[in-house]
């Protein structure tokens, strides 16, 4: 599919709070899958989860897991983030979360927005929300 949002499908909001590789990888797996089905998807990362939106996400907890799962034929975090971006997934880093964790906004991946939780809630509207 093209990743063009289906206006009849409920939006999906993924709240990424945890800074573990496992949760970040799964957040982007869900995001890419939903977007490939034509759903409008927003990933909102806050606190430790903001690390997954950095250009260099090597400070996620248990980052060595990425190489293990890729050797086993499972898409890694980098591949899933790229796929999500290509499919039009909106990525937002929480302004307060960045400040709380001392993360420099300049370290974020290109195209990541910085906004607050109200922007996330507005994007999801009456859609579904998942918290990881």
Image (cartoon, rainbow, N blue to C red):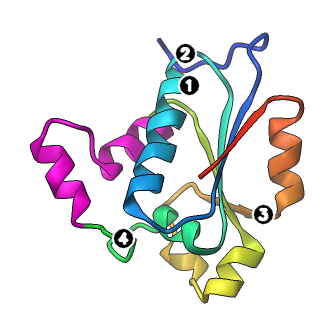
Label number found at residue 56 = 4
Q: What x and y, as percent, mark residue 44?
A: 67, 54
- Kindly state the secondary structure of the residue where label 4 is placed: loop
- Kindly state the secondary structure of the residue where label 2 is placed: loop
**In this view, the mark in front (2 or 3):** 2
User: Disc 2 versus disc 4: distance between alpha carbons?
Assistant: 28 Å
Residue 51 lies within the magenta run = no
Mark 2 residue crowding within 10 angstroms, few (<14) / some (14–19) / many (20+): some
Mark 1 lies on residue = 34
Mark 2 lies on residue = 37
**In this view, the mark in front (3 or 1):** 1
| Badge 2 vs badge 4, beta-carbon distance below 8 Å | no
Mark 3 lies on residue = 115
> Which of the marked residues, 4 or 3, is nearer the chain's N terminus?
4
Residue under the point 89% across and 30% down: 126
Q: What x and y, as percent, mark residue 63?
A: 29, 67
Magenta highlight range: 64-85
Q: What x and y, as percent, mark residue 33?
A: 48, 26
| Badge 4 vs badge 3, beta-carbon distance below 8 Å | no
């Amino acid at each position: 599919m093209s990743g063009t949002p289906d206006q009849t499908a409920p939006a999906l909001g993924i709240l990424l709070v945890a800074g573990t590789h496992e949760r970040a990888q799964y957040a982007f797996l869900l995001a890419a899958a939903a977007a490939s089905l034509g759903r409008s998807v927003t990933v909102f990362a806050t606190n430790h989860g903001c690390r997954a939106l950095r250009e260099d996400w090597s400070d996620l907890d248990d980052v060595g897991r990425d190489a293990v799962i890729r050797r086993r034929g499972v898409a890694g975090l980098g591949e899933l983030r790229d796929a999500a971006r290509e499919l039009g997934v909106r990525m937002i880093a929480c302004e307060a979360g960045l400040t709380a964790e001392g993360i420099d906004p300049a370290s974020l991946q290109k195209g990541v927005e910085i906004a607050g939780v109200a922007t996330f809630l507005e994007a999801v509207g009456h859609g579904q929300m998942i918290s990881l």
